[in-house]
Image: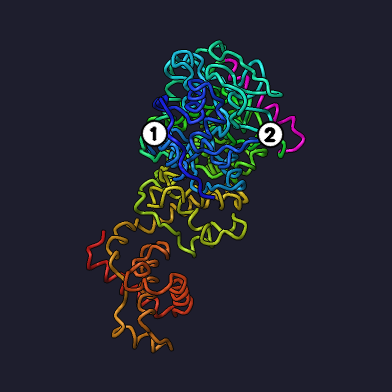
Amino acid sequence: MSVGLPRRLGLVLAPEVGESLASWIDRLGQDMRRSPGLVADDLGLRVVPGAVQRPLSLLFGITANDEQTAAVEAATGVGAEVLHAMHLSAYDGTVLDLSDLADDKASVQRVWFREWALFTTSRACPSCLAESGGVWMLWWRLAAAAVCPTHRLMLVSHCPRCGLELRRGTERNQGVPPRTLLVEPTRCANRTRDRMCGYPLTELPQVPVHDDVCAAQLAFLDAAYGRPPPVAGRCIGAAEWAWAFRSICGLVRFVGDSIELPAVVPAAAAQALVDDARRRRGAASSRQVPGYRSKPRSALLATALLAFAGRTLAAGNDDDLIEAMRPFGAAVVEGPGAQECRPLWRWRMPPLVSMAVRAVFPTPMARWSRAGAHVPFAADVDRSASRTPRRRRTSAASSRSDPGGCLEFRHLPRLVAEADYQELIEPWLRTPPGLSGRRYVALALARICGARTWARAGLALGWPDGRAAAVADYVCEFVVDPARFWQAATTLADRLQERGPIDYDHRRQALSRFVTIDRGIWGPLFAEHGGRLMPAGCRAAAVWLWTAMTCGELGDAPALLDPGWSTVPIKSRLRTCRTMSRWLPDALADQMLRFGATLLDSHNPR
């Protein structure tokens, strides 16, 4: 039902920069000697009267629609930009994702449980409340809000008198502004049986925190406002930074009290992490407690998580990032063990975090040795590292080169030859790796040639970030004998060296514009073998020749991606290429390979 705009109020307190909507309404009510619920009515926010005082909009304090924006501006003169800055939607696209939020109960509940925000409660800094006269900052409603960088104090999440989260309202109806009681912004406004708690929040206990924890909080706030700091020397988006932050916090909660937290964590915060782990172990069913990656409901737990995740994400390079994650690997050994880490296999993590986790996971243990994924280690090598150990030469060493000793990354195929794979590798893999197995061996060759992690092996082969970890995750489960597998991979590296290194990077560059073969020349040759060469077949033949000469992926062939063939659906193009590969006779294939060699000679290959 359409409702007219509210009347213009008299003198109105202006909202402070960074203030939340609920805080502004409380201060307006104190100034007007009017309950916050009635003030919300005066602003056109339309709070339903009655025993169950739910706002008409389930998005109260989360986001404002156009009608509410117009109503508030008519009543107070506060513009849309200022009003939206008082809602949690100010962090949408950075540390929160409210893209699927709608004004219905199912949507709100989905976002409520997923996002790291306190939708109906808040945390508070007692010193800030005392200095500002009761201004509650919006960022205090983020679940990662743990410390006040200004006063270097831990935030408070629960009232010591009523035991409820600050600004919860009632135990049953959360976040509902009262209609019959006045609220003092500097006192606890929680109600039990229509009686205000009234605890003076400026007298809350003050727990000092270390500068390192404050720096971690500032880094999170920078990400919240769209200015995420770099991670391991890489600039990433705010959403990915927040994803990495939540992933690391989830890993810390997973190993619980087994992990060694930074020394700067207050004792009460460290104990909160221990209590969280014990509560999970004591639950009869995992359904009784939220997931490990759910938002921390107390400032103490948030402080412990913030200190670890903040120090990790402050790493300046990959080595520092891996070193910062080593306590997690040690905690797995001391705590749940790799066998109990199966839930982690389903977690999606940013590539940088995934790389660091796999680098520190205890490789001799269980199936998640995919962290180092069966890389062989010498007896004196730290097994929590993921690098392939290099052999030291002595005067008594044989003249035989180390595995991959003269091979460079450019000499490695992205897809190892099927014959080599079937002869050397396939006996040590359970089915069905297929093409993924050949990709995995290519990554293994890169590891043998010096790549310290699977992620770096993928980058050495020119793979998109994250793909190498996905391939390693999948295929390593099928390795039946890791030692024999790596022995076979080493044999393959020696074989490639004996055949003479091939510069596959140069071949890909030389054939980067090879998108079709001449139908006039090849048509009669195909006819001799009972084939009919059509325009699509010319492109499919070019795809086959490109993959044969470069040992590359079918999907990377220039002919497959050529705009001249883009009008045909990709599935049809792939089907044509596979049909060509299955049909092609050996004699004709030999002729095409000689033609490919001629093309490479014309580009003066090395």
In the image, residue 483 sits, relative to residue 318, either above or below, namely below
* Circle 2/circle 1 CB separation < 8 Å: no
Quick one: SS at disc 1?
loop
The part of the image, by quadrant, that contains residue 55 is top right
Rounded to the nearest angstrom, the CA distance separating label 2 from label 1 is 31 Å
Measuring from the top left, give residue 77's x and y in whole percent. Answer: 38, 34
Quick one: SS at disc 2?
loop
> Which residue is under mark 1?
78
Crowd rating for badge 2 (residues with CA inside 10 Å; few <14, some 14–19, many 20+) = few
Crowd rating for badge 1 (residues with CA inside 10 Å; few <14, some 14–19, many 20+) = some
Measuring from the top left, give residue 478's x and y in whole percent. Answer: 61, 53
Dot 1 amino acid type: Val
> Which residue is under mark 2?
51
- Seen at 57% across and 17% down, the residue is 187
Identify which residue, 91 or 459, lies in the foreground: 91
**Which colouring convention does the figure follow?**
rainbow
Q: Which mark is residue 399?
A: none
The part of the image, by quadrant, that contains residue 118 is top right
* Position of residue 284 in the picture relative to residue 399 (left or right): right
The residues colored magenta run: 267-286
Mark 1 or mark 2, which is nearer the start of the sequence? 2
Identify which residue, 470 or 59, lies in the foreground: 59
* Position of residue 400 in the picture relative to residue 347 (left or right): left
Residue 404 visible to the viewer: yes
